[in-house]
Image: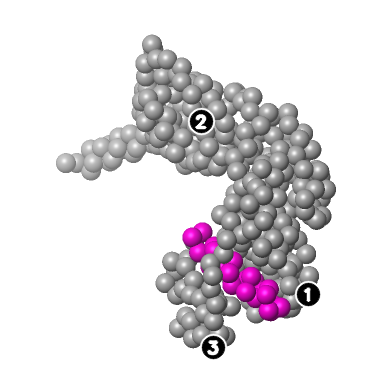
Amino acid sequence: MRRYQYYFILLILVVIALVCIFSFIYYIPARASLLYGPPANHLSISNRIEYSARLLSYGDELITPLDPNGAEQNFKIEQGESVISIANRLEGFGFISNAQAFYDYVVYVGLDLTIQAGEYKLSPKQSIIEIAQALQKFSPTDATLVILAGWRMEEIAASLPTSGLGIDPETFLIAAQTPPQVLDFTSATSMEGFFFPDTYTLPRATSVDQLLDIIARNFAQRMTQDLITAFNNRGLTVYQAVIVASIVEREAVRIEEAPMIASVYLNRLAINMKLDADPTVQYALGYQFDKNSWWKSPLALTDLQIVSPYNTYLNVGLPPTPISNPSLEALMAVAYPEASPYYYFRAACDGSGYHNFSVTFEEQIANACP
């Protein structure tokens, strides 16, 4: 082969390569933008090319309903549910033909960041694109606020913007400093401890005072006379019991251990021994910006010296208020604790979340991990 022929072939190959590159960089994204709209601004150039190519590979699947005669059905998106989980359930319930196609489309256009939790009416006669857009345009009549056991009120406030309620977190925290009248059987100075963990489905127009009243009533309904009597038999008022339960809630990684952990704290209180409870120190330390958490873990020895009425390593007795919002299981554990001789416990060394309990400080030391 003559040299000029070699160069000519090489030139052809270079041109083909440039055409391919041009197609990927310009034509494919342009084509996808024409068919599906512009990509999300936050996507990098490489991601735009990648998702554009994926969308084009699906052909008409994005715009073709799975079943043109399909019936409308309910579909619920849970608070905090991932987009891939939503996509998989949409396919599993027979709304769409391809979960990956749904996922790629919503990521490409940026709808993955704005899908709302709530109840929806969807149908397989809607295309993938129509269903993705319906999850944006649909404004549920009801909002859903999920309160997790062990949260402090600031964590509840932080969840409000994604609940569908139009309540400002700062307004919520200010209002929560005054307990509703339904809690008049306690000496509470705020709502901390009385945000009963539950899923609250409420009208989106619910006011902050209405919200606090609904949550407080939910708590009050759980306070049966038998439970209050059980607290009193332990020498505790309802408020004191909630304080102990709020600590137990944070300590009991395995909720089945809650009655035993409660027994330790009640045994300590009975002999006027300091509670030495890590969660009370975590509460005193407040928000940890480096950890993006309200609960610093692990604690340093210097943390145990923080001057605060909540530091039960320095102060005898209960902290002034609950330090979290306990579950019914934690409250029941305080009302009906295990009968035990234990005054100490520490985490087991196997990472299981369980604890080793002991009677003496010497046994507590012996239970330390190697």
> Residue 352's spot in the image, x, y percent?
43, 66
Main SS category, magenta section? helix
Query: Residue drawn 73% across and 31% down?
Result: 206
Neighbour tally class for label 3: few under 14, some 14-19, many 20 plus, Cα within 10 Å? few
Q: Secondary structure at mark 2?
A: strand
Left or right of 147: which side holds 86? left
Percent x, y for residue 196? 65, 47
Rendering coords of residue 112 (x, y %): 53, 35
Quadrant, the N terminus: top left
104 on left or right of 216: left
Q: Is residue 285 visible?
A: no
Which residue is tagged 1?
307
Identify the residue under disc 3. 362
Q: Secondary structure at mark 3?
A: helix
Q: Amino acid at mark 2?
A: Lys
Residues under labels 1 and 2: Cα distance? Answer: 47 Å
